[in-house]
Image (tube, grey):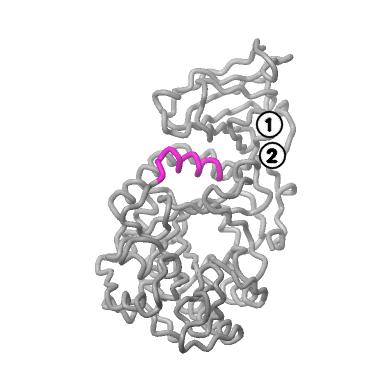
Amino acid sequence: MMKRFHDARDWFFEKRFGLFVHWGLYAIKGWHEQEIWRWPVSREDYGRYLAQFHPHRFDPDAWLDAARAAGMEYVVFTTKHCDGFCNWDSKYTDFKITNTPYGRDVLRLLSEACRKQGMPLCLYYSIPDMHHPGYPHAGRPYEFAQPQPGDSPGLEAYLDYVRAQMRELLTQYGPIHGWWWDANVMKHRDESFHDLIRELQPAAVINPRGFGAGDFRTPERDWDNAINADEAFAGPTEACQSVGLYSWGWKEDEDHYSDFHLRHSIAKVLAKGGNYLLNVGPRADGTFAPDDAARLRRIGKWLKPVREAFDGTVPASGLSDNRHVLLTRRGETVYVILHKPPTTDAVRLRPIGVLPDEAVLLNDGSPVECVVNRLPGYGPLVDAEPVLRLRGLPVNAMAGQVLAVRLRFSPAAAATLPTGHQGTDGEREFAADAYA
């Protein structure tokens, strides 16, 4: 995979599918991770969850096993969401995991498991904090309408709290590979926060939702049209999605995305050169729901045989004008990914006009019929020259799967392939301030 940072952060371009974990006191009610803000709930009533949270079945190795079953290669963990509850033993607040009946530092347990299993760990940190008395509430999202009785709001004092907690997280839990800010609704800017991360954890990539320019884009769910419109991402991108429609934390009556939707979403992002971060919210006892664990296994079963189309390749959809498929390339090998539900059992790759030496459906290893000929048609389907066509794809027998085909060309044939934007290093080099 291409290197774009040219330093220790380049792990991000090799480990491209990650597990997002939203977990905290909000798992008790099982409604939404922003329960305190969305319901809303008073600070006092929400604080009573502290005495109820006892994730006695929490096993970080089980989380990582579930991630690996899906083909995931890194973890992003919520250390603190907008409720202000801290999933580590912070000395700067009493609103933390070690003051629950469980009493143990779950971040320490998770970081040790990640270190043991060689799984990069990244940390999520919410900027709004609905528990801290110094946070300057002003009725923006993830805030109270105004400071609460007894609060002493002050931006600089609150930012000192953030810095102090950052130092704890960046110095006491081993290697940290990423920092995932969220919800800078204050719009405060201060690059010194990123300087601190880079000083203490130089391998950490930083997202752009914090106090300064980050290292990569974070399009969420399917809200950013560029996810669909772009043939290839112009810079480092990590799309994030949850297995459920409404919540990122555990939701007891969640409506879940279909495997079909998730597979197509993952394939689309990976083929365009991005990373994909898929979220599961553990239950209050610390376990993944059986349905969620099974969903991850099904994703992994699909991804494993087609993964070579994404790993170590560059986006190459410029080789063809067919916008119903995405192409990636590694040298003389081109991969065709049916990231959209197919409408026929064939793929036409105009203007490619040469046969590959080999065509294989990665999903099951079967050969794919290839022909080069001129086709009748109408409108844009009229071809003046013969074009490459992949025929007889098992779109019915494998309905619900995302098909991927490997085309291996001879050196002479590869030299005749059309030119176009194919995600070369020079074309896709990233400037760190591109997403300020």
Horizontal side of 50 relative to 182 (left or right) equals left
Judging from the image, what secondary structure is the residue with disc 2 in? Answer: loop
The image position of residue 305, as x and y in percent, is: 44, 37
Could you tell whether 390 is left or right of 38 in the image?
Answer: right
Q: Main secondary structure of the magenta part?
A: helix
Residue 193's mark?
A: none
Residue on which the image places disc 2:
422
Question: Residue at image x 30%, y 65%?
Answer: 284
Residue 332: x percent and y percent?
A: 64, 33
Amino acid at the residue labelled 2: Gln
Measured as percent of width and height from the top left, residue 334 is found at 60, 32
Which residue has dot 1 on it? 319
Q: Is residue 410 above or below residue 420?
A: above
Rendered position, 334 above or below 367 = below
Looking at the rendered structure, the kind of residue marked 1 is: Leu
Tell me residue 261's x, y (percent).
45, 40
Q: Residues within 10 Å of mark 1 (few under 14, many from 20)?
A: many
Q: Please say whether residue 262 is one of the residues in the magenta stretch.
A: yes
Quick one: SS at disc 1?
helix
Q: Which residue is at a point 54% across and 47% down the rendered structure image?
A: 222
Q: Quadrant of residue 189?
A: bottom right
Magenta residues? 257-269
CB under 8 Å between discs 2 and 1: yes
